[in-house]
Amino acid sequence: MAATAKQRVVVGLSGGVDSAVSAWLLKQQGHEVVGLFMKNWEDDDDDEHCTSRQDFLDAASVADLIGIEIEHVNFAAEYKDRVFAEFLREYQAGRTPNPDVLCNAEIKFKAFLDHAMRLGAERIATGHYARVRERDGRHELLKGLDPAKDQSYFLHRLNQAQLARTWFPVGELPKTRVRQIAAEIRLPVAGKKDSTGICFIGERPFREFLNRYLANTPGPIRDDRGRTLGEHVGLSFYTLGQRKGIGIGGVKERASAKGGAEHAPWFVARKDMAANTLYVVQGHEHPWLQSAGLEADDASWVAGAAPAAGALAAKTRYRQDDAPCRLAPHANGRFALDFGHAPQWAVTPGQSAVLYDGEVCLGGGVIATAR
């Protein structure tokens, strides 16, 4: 992050090492730094599965060491209305949403940003691995310099007004350097493991959690030849490309295709909501798991308008390589992607298709259908 005039910055302190180092870096640069801890979930918030209580204690310890104030803010009502309700709607419709994308757009860079502005902040900062670049009066969202940690995929719905007020201090650093800094200054979270998933689920079994909120109507599990292999517990509880937890482990010998495929793993390949049927196939490279293109809707573009049609790159899920594609923007926030001769694996409705031009994240949309 380039040197700049000293400003009042509110940093989202999560209790993790990335946000802690972000706050320390800003303080070192001479900014007036205030920490803010966001509590986004209250239902069955307990130490067994959701670590928000310990995370706040860690964030407070970091603030004390750095020498900044910290405020605890409860955004649970906003989270439930704006993120969790949509999360459930998508699962009920048979899609697989990405709540982290929605949380960034609606909570961390909207409710949090608004609150920070009321505190007199000129900027906010988070521990995300991404960068912001100003060019010709516009703000670009760039990938983090550490390719293994880049989080621009989750930030692709941010707009010009949000990016204009946001800093990502660790976006210029590799994660190894962030850990090194934390150890050098003896941050209490220097060795803390990175959090995985979203707090309202935590480490609890995902299916068990969803079962509290979604109706489960069992139905048949069939293979690509129409044979019934077992019974699913409800289509909402499965996602395309899923390999574990399908519940048909005992039918491999009986149902395998000819040609020695009896040991090939099974994958969820299709969900027929109308017939309440789950389709599974054997083998990672099965044609049903390959998509030459997709249609997406609810598009959000960083620049405020869709890029021109043509050659770009895309991710259809986090932690995958950029895939060459051709973009065809449509009206009403829809667009199509064509992957040509490089079909993508397990393209999943409800997930985000995010577009890139080199290191620049252009925005994206929600996958509606794969083809």
Image (cartoon, helix red, strand yellow):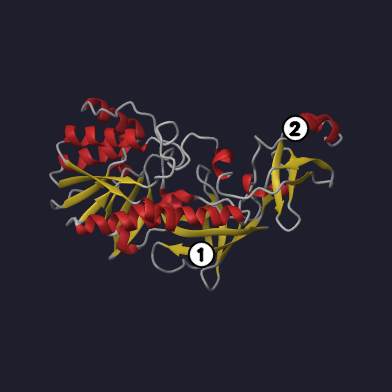
Please tell me which residue lies in front, 205 or 142: 205
Residue in view at x 43 percent, y 69 percent: 305
Of circles 2 and 1, which is in front? Answer: 1
Residue in view at x 63 percent, y 45 percent: 237
- Distance of mark 2 from mark 1, alpha carbons? 37 Å
Percent of width and height locating residue 294: 62, 59
Which residue is labeled 2 in the image?
A: 264
- Position above or below: 130 against 337: above
Using the image, tell me which numbered label, if any, was put on residue 298. Answer: 1
Quarter of the figure with residue 259? top right
Mark 2 or mark 1, earlier in chain: 2
Percent of width and height locating residue 166: 28, 54
Quarter of the figure with residue 139? bottom left
**Amino acid carrying mark 2 in the image:** Ala
- Position above or below: 15 against 85: above
Using the image, tell me which numbered label, if any, was put on residue 1. Answer: none
SS under mark 1: strand
Percent of width and height locating residue 261: 80, 32
Q: Few, some or many C-alpha atoms within 10 Å of disc 1 (few <14, some 14-19, many ≥20)?
A: some
| Residue 359 appearing in the image | no
> Quadrant where the C terminus lies?
bottom right
Residue in view at x 38 percent, y 58 percent: 158
In the displayed image of the protein, which residue is found farthest to the bottom?
A: 331
Quarter of the figure with residue 30? top left
Residue in view at x 23 percent, y 36 percent: 60
**Amino acid carrying mark 1 in the image:** Asp
